[in-house]
Image (spheres, rainbow, N blue to C red):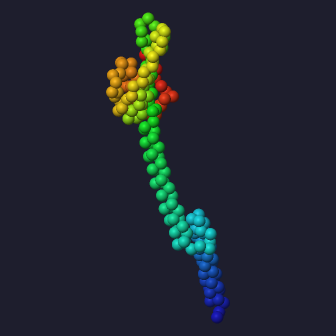
Amino acid sequence: MDAPTLTTLAIAAVVVALLALALAVTAQLRLAGVRRDFAALGGDGRTDIARVAATQNHRIDRLSAELTGLREHVASAEDDVRQSLRNVAVVRYDAFGDMGGRLSFSAAIVDDLGDGIVLSSIHARGESRTYAKGVVRGRSSITLTPEEQQALVSATQDEPSRGPQHAKDRS
């Protein structure tokens, strides 16, 4: 073969070699990315992708079951909170005209459904009397005084999130 043909063949061979090198580098970079993704899935390089996928699927199923259990616990806790006596209102007043200082009080303590108790303490000069009346759904089978009714209305209309630490003081 003559020199120009050999030169052309050499140049073509170099171009093909460079193209093959570029393809090899690209393939190596893509393979490194796939290995990185495989490792992120929990593969150790000795396990096939199907086994890694099955393991991940099992983990997802287990997490889903745990999530369902947690939702049931949260629903139960929410139900317990609704039934807790956490809505409180206090009405202070003077039971007798000759007494000052608003030492008598009525306190309503109910859950979110309006079930609970109304406590009243009537303070007089020589004695103090305390009364308790049960409440179901915001009503009592025993007649409530106006102050007890006011405390009950305040407690049942209070925001549930406020709780007993924010007891109201009404006059």
Task: Please identify the residue farthest to the top as the structure is shown.
Answer: 98
Residue 94 visible here: yes
In the rendered view, tell whether residue 75 sits above or below residue 35: above
| Pick the front one: 142 or 83 | 142
Which residue is at 46% across, 32% downward? Answer: 86
Residue 154 visible here: no
| Pick the front one: 14 or 58 | 58
Which residue is at 65% across, 85% downward? Answer: 10
Task: Please identify the residue farthest to the right as the structure is shown.
Answer: 3
Which residue is at 35% across, 21% downward? Answer: 144
Check the picture and name the quadrant holding the N terminus.
bottom right
Residue 146 at x, y percent in the picture? 36, 18
Residue 161 at x, y percent in the picture? 46, 34
Q: Left or right: 105 with respect to 9?
A: left
Check the picture and name the quadrant holding the C terminus.
top left
In the rendered view, tell whether residue 39 sits above or below residue 102: below
**Residue 96 figure quarter:** top left
Residue 127 at x, y percent in the picture? 48, 12
